[in-house]
Amino acid sequence: MFVASEYQPDSLDILNHQGSVQQKLEYLLENLQQTYPYICRIAIAIYDALQDQLKTFASAGSSHPLLEHYQTALHEVSSLQHMKDNRFIRVINDIGDELGGGESPTQHTEALLKAGFHASYTFPMRYNERFLGFVFFNGAEKDCFQGRALVDMDMIGHMITLIVYNERSNIRTLIATVKSAMLLTHSRDPETGGHLERMARYSRLIAARLAPKHGFSDEYVEHICLFAPLHDLGKIKVPDSILLKPGRLEEEELDEMRRHPMYGHELVDALINNYGLNGVSHVNMLRNIVLYHHETLDGGGYPEHLRGEDIPIESRIVSVADVFDALTSARPYKPAWDNDKAFAELKRLAGNKLDRGCVVALMDCRKQIEEIQQRFRENEYG
C-alpha cells in the first residue's frame, strides 16, 4: 500500500553554514520564539581562563544590548563561579523577587530589570571538560522557565555550546597550525609568547574603547584579540639569516623582510583552504591584520603604502598595540621603556604614523595595561 510522504524544510539548516555566532544566535531565537514568544533574549559570555575574565560576546533579541564590551573577573561573581564549579544550571522565575531578600543587584541584573525582563535561565557552556562561558536566556514574563521549557532551554544551550566551541576550535586549529609551521621550518621570530599575549589584549582594550564610534560588536572585538597574535605569520617564510640577524639589515634584506605581510596573507588563504577552515567568521579581519599591520598613516609603510583611513581599522588597532608592547619590552638591542616614556612616543607618532584615536584609546586604559603587564610579564625563559 502506498503511503504519501510529507517533506518539511529544515528550519535550522542555517546553523550548518558559514556565518557569525551572532547571526546563528539570532536565528535560534527566532525559531525558539515560535514556541515560547515570551523568551525575548539570548546572550553569550565567554571565559578567558588566563585572566579569569568573563566577557560579553554575542546577544540576540534586544534592540539595544544590555551590556556591551563588558568584562569582569569570574571569581567576583559568586553565583556564576558556583555554577561553573558545580555544573549547575540556574533558573530564576522572578528576578525582582530573587533580590527581595536584600541582595544588592549586579550591573547585569539591574540592566535586565530596566529592560523589562523578569525571568532568566543561565546555562554553563562546557565541552570535553573545558569551561567556555555561559548562555543567558531571558523572559519577559515571570515563571516562564518551567516544565517543557526547561528541557528545550537545556537542548538549545547545548546547541549554542557546540556553535561556540566549533568557532573557537577553528581558530585554535589555525593558530596551532601556524605554530607548528614555525617549528617545522625552524623559523624563530625573536618575539616571545608574552609579547603575543600582551599585544592581543592591548588590541582588545583599544577595540572596546573605539566600539561605540565604529559600531564594533562584542564578537568583532573578541576576534581582534584572537587574530592579533597572528599578525606576523608571514615571518615563517623569511630566512633565519635575515630574521635573526643581530646587526643592521642591508637594503636587499630589508626588502625581503618587508614582504612578510604578503607572505602571511598567502599563508592565511592556504591554511584556510587546506584545513577546511572556511567557517571561521571575520576571516577578512584576519587577512587585513596580517597584510596591513605595517602600513602607516602617512603612506610610508608597507606593503601597499596605504594612507589614513584607507588602512583598515583592525590593522591600525593592532599596529598601535604592537608598537606599544615593543617599546615596553626588553630586546637584545634595547632595554624596556617604562609606560610613561612609551606613551610619549605613541603621542609623537599619533596622527603621522599611528592612528590618533587608537593611541588615545590605549592610553585611557592604563590600569588595565598594568594588570596585563603583570599577568604576562617576561621571565628568564621569555
Image (cartoon, rainbow, N blue to C red):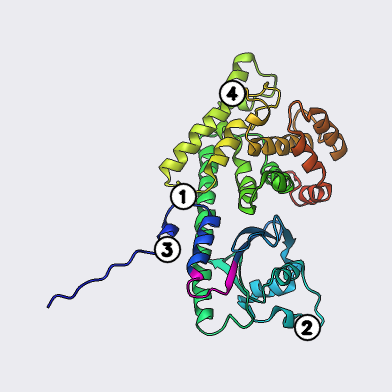
Q: What residue type is labelled 4?
A: Glu
Is residue 124 in sight in this rendering?
no
Marked residue nearer the N-terminal end (4 or 1) = 1
Marked residue nearer the N-terminal end (2 or 1) = 2
Give the structural element (helix, strand or loop) at label 2: loop
Are the two marked residues, 3 and 1, in contact with CB atoms closer than 8 angstroms? no
Instruction: Pinpoint residue 98: horizontal percent, then vertical percent.
Output: 73, 81
Relative to 166, residue 230 above or below: above
Task: Choose mark 2 or mark 1, whichever is in front.
Answer: 2
Residue 202, picture quadrant = top right
Distance in Å between CA atoms under marks 2 and 4? 61 Å
Residue labelled with disc 4: 304
Q: Which amino acid does label 1 sit on?
A: Gly
Is residue 138 in sight in this rendering?
yes
The residue furthest top is 251
Are the two marked residues, 3 and 2, in contact with CB atoms closer than 8 angstroms? no
Q: What residue type is labelled 2?
A: Gly
Relative to 178, residue 147 above or below: below
Magenta region? 32-41
Instruction: Pinpoint residue 358: horizontal percent, then vertical percent.
Output: 74, 38
Residue labelled with disc 1: 279
Are the two marked residues, 4 and 1, in contact with CB atoms closer than 8 angstroms? no
Residue labelled with disc 2: 100
Q: Residues within 10 Å of mark 2 (few under 14, many from 20)?
A: few
Marked residue nearer the N-terminal end (4 or 3) = 3
Tell whether 145 sits left or right of 270.
Answer: right
Tell whether 73 sits left or right of 256.
Answer: right
Q: How crowded is mark 1: few (under 14 residues within 10 Å), some or many (20 or more)?
A: some
Residue appearing at x 63%, y 19% in the figure: 254
Residue 50, picture quadrant = bottom right
Distance in Å between CA atoms under marks 3 and 1? 17 Å
